[in-house]
Image (spheres, rainbow, N blue to C red):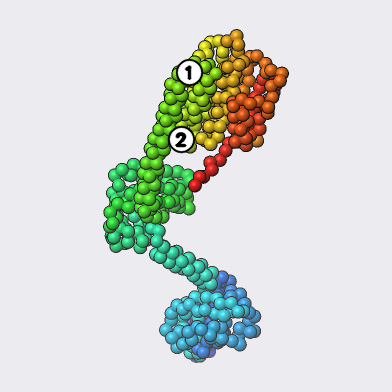
Amino acid sequence: MLKHNLSKLGYAVKRALKESKEHLEKKIAEKALKESEKKFRALFEENKNPILVLSEDGKFTEFNQAALDFMETEPSILLNQKIQDYLPPEATPIDMEDWFTGRIVELPLKINDDIKILELTITPVTTAEKNIIFTTGRDLTEQKRIENALKNSEEKYRLMVENQTDMVIKFNPNGEILFASPSYSEVLGRDEEKIVGSNFLPLVHQEDQEKTYRALDKLHNPPYVVFLEHRLLTMHGWRWIAWADKAIMDDEGNLEAFVGVGRDITERKLAEDRIMKSLREKEVLLREVHHRVKNNLQIISTLLSLQSAQSDDQTVIDLYRESQNRIISIALIHENLYQSDDLNSINFKKYVESLTDDLFNSFGVDPGNIKINIKIDDNVIMGIETAIPCGLIINELISNALKHAFPQGEGEIYLELSKKDNGKYLLKIKDNGKPFPDEFEIKNTDTLGMKLISNLAKQLDGKLTINWKNKEFLVEFNELEYMERI
């Protein structure tokens, strides 16, 4: 600064300070810009979502690593391509002019023979030099796959529910309906909109409400499944509906709602009622038949008794009595059957006890002098096909013992019926009375009783064995199956 220009010193200093300040501000701005660019580049590169920068015609100009991973390609390849090159043939063409308005689009892109879905948020950028399109993307491929799978599943479910004849409802623990299938609406004769929100419990028949409430209570506990049949008031009156109900639990295991699948079983119930009525009628008729057969047999026994009273020949009287005892043994079978809960079978122990009592009375035997020990399980149940021949065998053997084994009027008879491991029955009858004669052989005997025993054992498909030393008769046989007769 020259001395003669000192007057300009103040302005020069001010200018110098201003230029220095501007220079400093410029350096600070440049530094801030560099920091900003560094941060932007870091955000650009490290972003986990694909970022693509496109030219006006859709050519790739910049991209981050996430974009390369999504496109499954190399930078040198991507820089020579346009986004339109990745569109599958069936996709809607891209109008790049629309993209300069800024929007969000979902693009199907064909990448290595697979279709991926990319959601792009488009931001158009205009500079002094050129226009570019800045996009940030989000991979929707897996989400779309799940959505499509869910949609397909829902469509299949809806198709199944809407077209099946079984009724489907969803209801809360109070009985309020949350969903009703068209078939349920059709049965009730009401629109689905009117059914949803209503309560089905008032529609249940008064006599069936108690068991319905019990069933709903069971749904609150494992296994959370119940089966129920009740009458429901429908547009066609009271109808029997069979329900299979299941509880729906949330992720935390709390009760959320119930789902019921119902089927109209009214016709089946009516058929069952008709069948049960018919069975009851047949049961009454069958009991009456057994009762009348027993009465007729007793009449025959009485006639034989009257006929024997006209004879003085003891041999003839004994023959009449034996015939009476055989008839009574058969009559007792029919008596037990019409008094039994099961008309197909009888309790064999009770039958044998009644049979032996009648035999003792017939022969005038004092039970205090001649005792009979009966060992038969209470659960031995026989059908009439087996009980009659088995009862006749017992009748013959006990009668023979009472007639011939105890000349002194004292002794014991042992009767046992047991079931073996092979499923066969074993009948044992013996006494401690007089031994068999040495010359006695069952094959050679001419007595009617012994012939009956042999024939009856064959009728039972059984095996007859005699232990001569112990005076023990053994009959091993199977339960005979009912043979249908024409």
Three-letter amino acid code at the position of disc 1: Ser
> Which residue is located at x 51 percent, y 89 percent?
57
Q: Is residue 235 above or below residue 281?
A: below
Q: CA distance from mark 1 to mark 2?
A: 42 Å
Q: Quadrant of residue 285?
A: top left
- Quickly name the residue at label 2: 342
Three-letter amino acid code at the position of disc 2: Asp
Q: Position of residue 377 (x, y in %)?
A: 56, 26
Q: Secondary structure at mark 2?
A: loop
> Do the residues under discs 1 and 2 have CB atoms within 8 angstroms?
no
> Which residue is located at x 54 percent, y 43 percent?
483
Q: Is residue 28 visible?
A: no
Q: Position of residue 14 (x, y in %)?
A: 47, 82
Which tag is nearer the camera, tag 1 or tag 2? 1
> Which residue is located at x 38 percent, y 37 percent?
284
The reply, left or right, for residue 340 in relation to residue 186 is: right
Label at residue 311: 1
Crowd class of label 2 (few under 14; some 14 to 19; many from 20; radius 10 Å):
few
Q: Is residue 378 above or below residue 62?
A: above
Q: Front-most of 96 and 102?
A: 96
